[in-house]
Image (cartoon, rainbow, N blue to C red):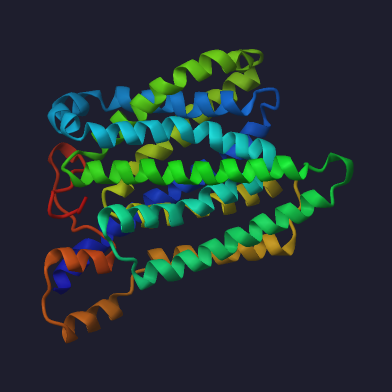
């Protein structure tokens, strides 16, 4: 029992670290977008997710070809995930444009864990662990503080303040972005659980989603070519947060639940708030920093292992089926995968 726990701690910790690093990269997108003020939110979203998704598909092409039969068998899940990928960036970046970077990010990312947990509960019948609930309460409390502080600041900013209608529409679009984010995270996790590698699953879902975004990029992306700075922002968004970020996120999804992964990404609005101070020059209120602190506590609850608790449980409870152990631990059992790929066995990571 001790040996199994020891072997599982490192991969799960590495998976959480990958998700957190992806969140850091995603937290830079709002600040990066401010460096191209003449580029609209639809163009930013289309170039970031569209080109980033197509690049994932190109890199994963050998795996996609090799695992095509599995992908065809799960084509419904693939299509659902791809549609969610295509819908996410217009909603997310329009939300930031209408309600502000901090509010749009907080609502979009903050609502995703709840949507993800609801999907897992309704579709997969999975129960919510006490650890996840504790972390989610801390993280969502932090996002609410961030959102409230930003809304208060916007309301008192005088003639340049956003209208109530604009803010409400931005919040609605943010909730839409959170739902679509949860849907494509769940879809990718389900594909991995059915035996696909993370590269093939993410490459297919994001590649098809990227294709769906090409018309949007063609219609709105001319401003990306107006200056070198705008082109550089577009290239950065596609290559770093979207391509590299989602490669890391996909690797993490192979080892933790979608609801846990989306909760870990609550780090993103905290990173966005800090960058707003360090790079953009914004001044944030104490409530914002309190929200950041709560989010950090949330991440600690979800990522710091508690070996003592696991040891006591192992000593006082009889052996249970592997599936039940995984649900309590919120992880899948690590295993070897050929050629360095991340593959989840059907019994190790439940759909």
Viewed as shown, does residue 347 lie left or right of 251? left
Which quarter of the figure is the N terminus placed in?
Answer: bottom left
Q: Position of residue 334 (x, y in %)?
A: 18, 55
Query: Which residue sits at x=34%, y=52%?
Result: 258
Q: Is residue 341 above or below residue 273?
A: above
Outermost residue on the bottom side: it is: 316
Q: Quadrant of residue 256?
A: bottom left
Q: Quadrant of residue 347?
A: bottom left
Q: Position of residue 279 (x, y in %)?
A: 69, 42
Q: Is residue 223 above or below residue 144?
A: above
Q: Position of residue 325 (x, y in %)?
A: 19, 68
Query: Which residue sits at x=30%, y=41%?
Result: 188
Depth check, front residue: 341 or 291: 291
Q: How many marks?
A: 0
Residue 218 visible in this rendered orientation of the protein: yes
Q: Is residue 24 above or below residue 320?
A: above
Residue 280 visible in this rendered orientation of the protein: no
Q: Position of residue 5 (x, y in %)?
A: 20, 68
Viewed as shown, does residue 231 lie left or right of 214? right
Viewed as shown, does residue 28 lie left or right of 165? left
Query: Which residue sits at x=58%, y=35%?
Result: 93
Outermost residue on the right side: it is: 159
Viewed as shown, does residue 158 lie left or right of 334? right
């Amino acid at each position: 029992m001790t040996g199994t726990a020891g072997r599982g701690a490192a991969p799960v910790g590495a998976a959480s670290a990958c998700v957190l690093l992806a969140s850091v990269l995603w937290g830079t997108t709002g600040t990066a977008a401010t460096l191209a003020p003449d580029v609209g939110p639809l163009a930013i979203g289309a170039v970031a997710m569209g080109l980033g998704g197509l690049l994932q598909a190109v890199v994963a092409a050998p795996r996609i070809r090799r695992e095509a039969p599995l992908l065809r068998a799960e084509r419904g899940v693939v299509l659902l995930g791809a549609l969610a990928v295509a819908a996410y960036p217009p909603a997310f970046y329009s939300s930031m444009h209408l309600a502000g970077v901090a509010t749009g990010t907080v609502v979009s990312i903050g609502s995703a864990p709840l949507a993800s947990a609801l999907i897992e509960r309704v579709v997969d019948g999975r129960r919510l662990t006490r650890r996840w609930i504790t972390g989610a309460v801390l993280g969502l409390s932090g996002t609410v503080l961030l959102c409230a502080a930003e809304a208060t600041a916007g309301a008192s900013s005088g003639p340049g303040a956003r209208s109530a209608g604009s803010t409400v529409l931005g919040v609605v679009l943010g909730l839409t972005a959170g739902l679509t984010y949860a849907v494509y995270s769940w879809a990718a996790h389900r594909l991995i659980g059915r035996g696909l590698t993370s590269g093939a699953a993410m490459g297919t879902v994001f590649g098809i989603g990227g294709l769906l975004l090409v018309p949007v990029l063609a219609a709105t992306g001319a401003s990306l070519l107006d200056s070198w700075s705008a082109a550089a922002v577009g290239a950065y968004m596609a290559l770093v947060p979207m391509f590299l970020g989602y490669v890391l996120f996909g690797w993490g999804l192979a080892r933790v639940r979608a609801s846990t992964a989306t909760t870990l990404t609550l780090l993103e609005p905290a990173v966005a708030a800090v960058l707003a101070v360090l790079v953009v020059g914004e001044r944030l209120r104490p409530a914002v920093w309190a929200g950041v602190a709560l989010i950090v506590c949330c991440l600690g609850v979800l990522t710091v292992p508690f070996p003592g608790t696991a040891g006591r449980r192992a000593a006082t409870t009889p052996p249970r089926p592997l599936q039940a152990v995984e649900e309590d631990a919120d992880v899948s059992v690590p295993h070897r995968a050929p050629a360095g790929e991340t593959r989840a066995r059907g019994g190790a990571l439940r759909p």
